[in-house]
Image (cartoon, rainbow, N blue to C red):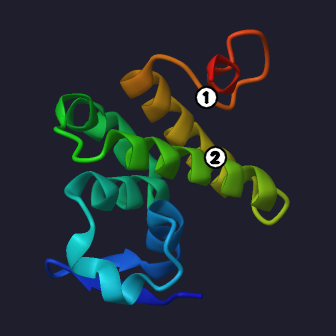
């Protein structure tokens, strides 16, 4: 824990980047990480940045919509699984991912109820 990777002279949590990209060996993929994934890593590391980056996310040209959506889902699932470790930290991370999913996709894929995005498939 505490390991970092450097992309474009900025430091990112290796664990967060693994989670966001879905790749365990992130060190060999650092040049392939899209800008929106890097910003997402910053925001889940410090959720207080979210209010200032909402427009950035909303207007971003997301390179791979499906991959970004799954990154948001991975953050939500990971947050639920780890909630007992640090409830405030993981509630904030989940809030970030859910807020961005609602902003960008209009609904939550993992929501409970009749309108769940997973039910539509």
- Identify the element where label 1 is drawn: loop
Q: What is the C-alpha distance between the residues marked 2 and 1? A: 10 Å
Q: Which image quadrant for residue 58?
A: top left
Q: For the point 18% across and 30% down, which residue is it?
A: 59
Furthest residue in direction top, as rendered: 114
Q: Which image quadrant for residue 8?
A: bottom left
Q: Residues within 10 Å of mark 2 (few under 14, many from 20)?
A: many
Name the residue nearer the viewer: 83 or 65. 65
Q: For the point 27% across and 38% down, which residue is it?
A: 52
Asked whether, in this view, residue 85 is left or right of residue 29, the answer is right
Closer to us: mark 2 or mark 1?
A: 1
Residue highlighted by disc 1 = 109
Q: For the point 69% across and 50% down, which residue is it?
A: 77
Furthest residue in direction right, as rendered: 84
Task: List x then y, in percent, for residue 82.
Answer: 77, 61
Asked whether, in this view, residue 84 is left or right of residue 108, the answer is right
Residue highlighted by disc 2 = 76
Task: List x then y, in percent, for residue 114.
Answer: 76, 9
Q: Quadrant of the N terminus?
A: bottom right
- Identify the element where label 2 is drawn: helix
Q: Earlier in the sequence, mark 2 or mark 1?
A: 2
CB-based contact (under 8 Å), mark 2 and mark 1: no
Task: List x then y, in percent, for residue 34.
Answer: 23, 60
Q: Count the marks: how many? A: 2
Can you tell which mark lies on residue 19? none
- In the rendered image of this protein, does residue 46 appear above or below residue 8? above
- In the rendered image of this protein, does residue 56 appear above or below residue 29? above
Q: Residues within 10 Å of mark 1 (few under 14, many from 20)?
A: many
Q: For the point 46% across and 17% down, which residue is it?
A: 106
Q: Quadrant of the C terminus?
A: top right
């Amino acid at each position: 824990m505490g390991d970092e990777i450097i992309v474009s002279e900025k430091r990112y949590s290796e664990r967060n980047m693994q989670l966001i990209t879905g790749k365990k060996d992130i060190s060999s993929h650092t040049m392939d990480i899209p800008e929106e994934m890097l910003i997402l890593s910053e925001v889940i590391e410090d959720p207080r940045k979210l209010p200032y980056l909402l427009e950035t996310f909303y207007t971003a040209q997301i390179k791979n919509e499906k991959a970004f959506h799954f990154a948001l889902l991975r953050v939500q699932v990971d947050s639920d699984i780890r909630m007992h470790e640090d409830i405030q930290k993981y509630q904030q991370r989940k809030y970030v991912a859910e807020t961005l999913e609602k902003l960008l996709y209009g609904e939550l894929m993992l929501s409970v109820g009749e309108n769940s995005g997973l039910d539509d498939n």
